[in-house]
Amino acid sequence: MKKIIFRFLILISLSIFGFIIYFSTIGIKTNAFNDQIIKEVKKINNQLELELDKISIILDPFKFKLVLKTIGANLKNKNKLIKLESVKSNIDIKTFINKKFSLSELDINTRTIEIKNLISFVRSIEDNPQIFILEKFVKKGYLIADINLKFDQKGNIKDDFIIKGFVKDGEVKPFKKIDLSKINFIFTIQNNEFEFKDINLSYDNNDLKFPELILIKQKNEFLISGKNKNKNLFLDDKKINQLFNNDLSNIKFESAEFDLENTFSFKINDKYKIDDLKINSLMNLKSSKIVSSKNLKEFFPELNEIIELSDHQIQIEYKKDLLSIIGNGNILIQKEKDNINYNFSKSKTNLKFDTSLEIKKNPFHLNFLNYKKDQDDKLKIVILGVKNLLSNEINLKDISIKEKNNKFEFKNLFLSNKYKIKSISKVNLDYFDNDLLKNELSIKKKDKDYLLDSKSFNATKIIDDLLKADKNSESEKIFSKNFRLNIKIKEAFLDKNHLIENLNGYLKFNDSEVIDANLLGDFSNNKRINFTIRSTSNEKITTLYSDLAKPFVNRYKFIKGFEEGNLNFHSIKQNNVSNSKLIIDNFKVQEVPALAKLLTLASLQGIADLLTGEGIRFTDFEMKFSNKNDLMRIEELYAIGPAISLLMEGYIESDDLVSLRGTMVPATTINRTISSIPLLGDILVGKKVGEGVFGVSFKIKGPPKKLKTTVNPVKTLTPRFITRTLEKIKKN
């Protein structure tokens, strides 16, 4: 009997064990629980409709739970169908036995579905801000996901839900002008955290990779952090402007090719405002093209239309509205590559910059100082300053230009928002210029005025620029404030061969124009020079007297071989019109191309030969003229000498047109004409017989470089000519 009972127990045990094994591995299929599961799902959301096939029931003996699983289910939500690969749920055996059937856990495995449909589905289950943000940004794409939901005893979803899966061919638009496409990544979503890994996407045909991106909910904000590392990125001018919101108004990029490695983090609040943005970047800028500014031509004479940057290593850091950019690399401004270093720091109120440019084989000019870099020497430019972003004013704290023994230093140069000079604390110049003349000069600010102190200074270029400048041009108005410049120069060169010693005085500037001036200096041999300007409310009077005329006349290249003579200039300016008078006495010239041609056409070859030989002497030269804008009107130009005399009038219109007419008479003809005057002629000239013709009238007209000269013999001299000649003879 015992054996029978023992065998029965063994049989029962084996049967139970076999049942458990079978029930735990194969299970049974039934639709008895379908309605109950559908009801439990509706507790989650009443709009959810679950379509189930027969359910496989499998025992989990270790967790003392029943596992319910079905293949090929469908989930409907607001008439949108989501196809599911499988649905699995766990039921506590105790609740099942007690007929208190409820879901403790639900696993949903999807097939390939559209992302937007899945986002809508998840929002119907748990409508949280994370899901809403995703729905806002996501435009298209596909995914496969595994969704794990856990329920409390009341059938509510717990906060520890998990969604895992991967996305394929996604497209999002986080900002208006930025489209991201070809998005592929793996994701994990659980309660307050989003984790994205192995992210690959495309922006403007650039393939971007992000190893990791994490979103964490913190109260009403989301902390987003991540990394990315990308190579061979390319942006054209449109994409660059989009990224910088057209803030680079002064810089026109054509393209950029680079490698980029980033770590970043930022917060997004419930109103989708980005805050606490932090970026750390390392950029390898392989190549970038920038449209050059025409203004740079003044400093870089061989300036390229496109400036190229290459092989730049750039560190970028952004934190709490502070942007820092530190970099260095090659820059191609002209024919040869140079090296540039830069450090920019931008806050809400200021832009600080520290830049150095090292020029080796390329030229560099400071035309306003008559300086050119030696082709084979190295030159370094350092600019340190700050720009006030509220007022747009600039303080160039330090500008330094050094080449061997040549040095240019500018301290605290303040510029207005229109780039006009407000003030400067100090200037130090120590260099050899293009004329191989030594320049040693300093300017220091004292209260509202400035003191210019110099051992030696070549003023050639400055004088040339003043003679050519358009006084009414706004570009010439470089100062924004009025000031007085006191001048003390031991040696001031007017050109290579003429210097002024002990040039002292002052210049007063108003609206970038000299309104009051007095400069005195000495030439050698006790010769003097004096320059003055006096201004009233309605007129400006300018005078220049020099015992030496040559350094001023030599500036007009069409006159060569000018010797001797003194100069007296007087001008009155009213209502933007200058009326001037220039007098030069006792001089000679050796070459004046227009005069030589005129003499040849008049068949006065002997005098023409004299002009090109020892030169022609004039005892008197006087010119009355007026200037208004680009028009010079010569009311009268009169020159008298032993060989020839001239009377001329006309106008010169800038560099476009010259129109002159006049009379030229050999001196012997003048003498004969005057000698024919009864009594007066005998007294002044005597009875010397002259040459045959009285003289010629002439016209000179055309563009400055293509002047056309015509002559016409005259039989009778004009009363005006005779009158002016007599005046000069009496004077002498």
Image (cartoon, rainbow, N blue to C red):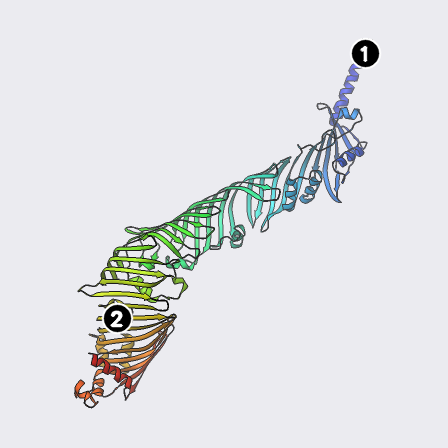
Residue extending furthest toward the top: 1
Q: Amino acid at mark 2?
A: Asn
Where 95 falls versus 553 (above or below)? above
The picture places residue 613, in percent across and down from the top left corner, at 21, 75
Vertical placement of residue 206 versus 634, above or below: above
Can residue 590 be seen at all in this image of the molecule? Answer: no
Q: Residue 87 got which mark?
A: none
On the image, the x and y values in percent for residue 651 come to: 35, 76
Residue found at x 28% / y 80%: 647
Residue drawn at x 42%, y 56% is: 419
Is residue 327 at least partly visible in the picture? yes
Residue that badge 1 annotates: 5
Q: What residue do we see at 68% from left, 42% from top?
A: 119
Instruction: Depth check: give the residue in front, 227 or 371.
Output: 371
Which numbered mark, 1 or 2, is in the foreground of this view?
Answer: 2
Q: Which residue is mark 2?
A: 568
